[in-house]
Image (cartoon, rainbow, N blue to C red):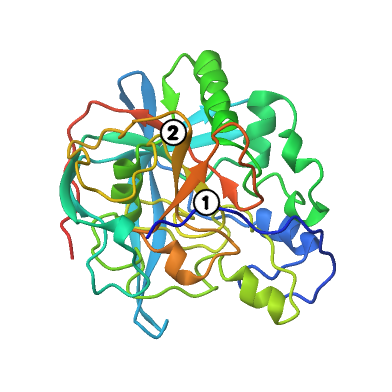
Amino acid sequence: MSRRFKGVREKRRSGSSPARGTNIHSGDLRKITKKRTAPAERKATSHRGVALRAFAFETVTLDAGGRETGRRRGRATQFAERLGKRAILQMVQIPGGTFTMGAPANEAGSRDSERPQHVVTVPPFYLGRYPVTIGQWRAVMGVLPPGMKTLGKEFRASGRQPVMRVSCDDAEAFCSELSRKTRRDYRLPAEAEWEYACRAGTITPFAFGEAITRDVVSHDGEMQRLAGGHPVTVPVGSLGAANDFGLFDMHGNVWEWCRDSWHRDYQGAPIDGSAWRSDERTRVLRGGSWYSPAKLCRAASRALGRETNSVRSREIGFRVAMAAPSVLVAPRNR
């Protein structure tokens, strides 16, 4: 059964005591933003017109009870696209590879729309290290999206919070303007690219293992609200844990638009990593949000986004992708 994305009620909330995860004051968000989320990048190398730099990151493994069973450092490669004096877009080099897309029938919280599982080969590409932020949107488009202007200040307290209440058309307009300004071909990721990048070589429900917690993923805002909290989005990367490709916030914070039209299951889906387009009225949303329960933040979870020009929710944002014809080797499934 497919899940139609409806979003949460648009209601301003203010005031709360700080807690872990997404239950944070807007003042605290400014403090978090000042924190470094990764060590300094290393010496640059050139690749097809972009200056690539290695960067280090930290990732964790959680068991089914949410207990941390491992913490390790990794390295990946990215290039930085300057969007003005203050904003930088970091694009991570994603190696090509083959993976199994979708969820097995016995995965808790999974739906028929995530099946049948099928093997997909994804060419190399670049993907944003984080969801597009308020600061990046302003640098490219000049002003906030109209839908964000009526949001409570806690959702726009920091320029590093993810931009939200953008329709798919809004997100594609950003990609077009970014492409015009940089003379590169930016776009939304295909759904297969998105899941491949989210899994980063893993086969568990989450890139971090069998479960997630609020310490590593901004999610479960509905339960926090019912308990009297005031959950909001967090600055991108501020929870500190990346997946094995060096990508942050692939689970939670904001749902992310993909290029694909919605299909109720994977019967007949492409196996080459390309977008599956059949209409211009629907798109796929991935990753869950700050408000979603954990089951909707799984790597295989997908939601229907109707009316590409009008669906705008404070749960929805996006990240950008760019094709890269290089040949790299992905980590093995584990």
Residue 206 place in picture, x, y as percent: 35, 66
Question: Callout 1: few (<14), some (14-19), or many (20+) C-alpha neighbours within 10 Å?
Answer: many
- Image-quadrant location for residue 19: bottom right
Residue 39 place in picture, x, y as percent: 48, 53
Q: In this figure, which residue is indicated by the disc labeled 2? A: 188
Count the numbered circles shown.
2
Q: Which of 9 and 49 is in front in this view?
A: 9
**Identity of the residue drawn at 33% across and 47% down:** 76
Residue type, mark 1 in image = Trp
Q: Is residue 160 above or below residue 84?
A: below
Q: In this figure, which residue is indicated by the disc labeled 1? A: 255
Q: Is residue 143 left or right of residue 250?
A: right
- Image-quadrant location for residue 67: bottom left
Residue 115 place in picture, x, y as percent: 24, 57
Q: Nearer the viewer, residue 286 or 218?
A: 286
Quarter of the rendering occupied by the N terminus: bottom left
Q: Work out whether mark 2 precedes mark 1 in sequence or the reverse, and give the earlier one.
A: 2
Q: In this view, does 25 lie to the left or right of 219?
A: right
Helix, strand or loop under label 1: strand
Q: Can residue 319 be seen in this view?
A: yes
The disc placed on residue 85 is: none
Q: Nearer the viewer, residue 152 or 117?
A: 117
Residue type, mark 2 in image = Leu
Residue 116 place in picture, x, y as percent: 20, 56
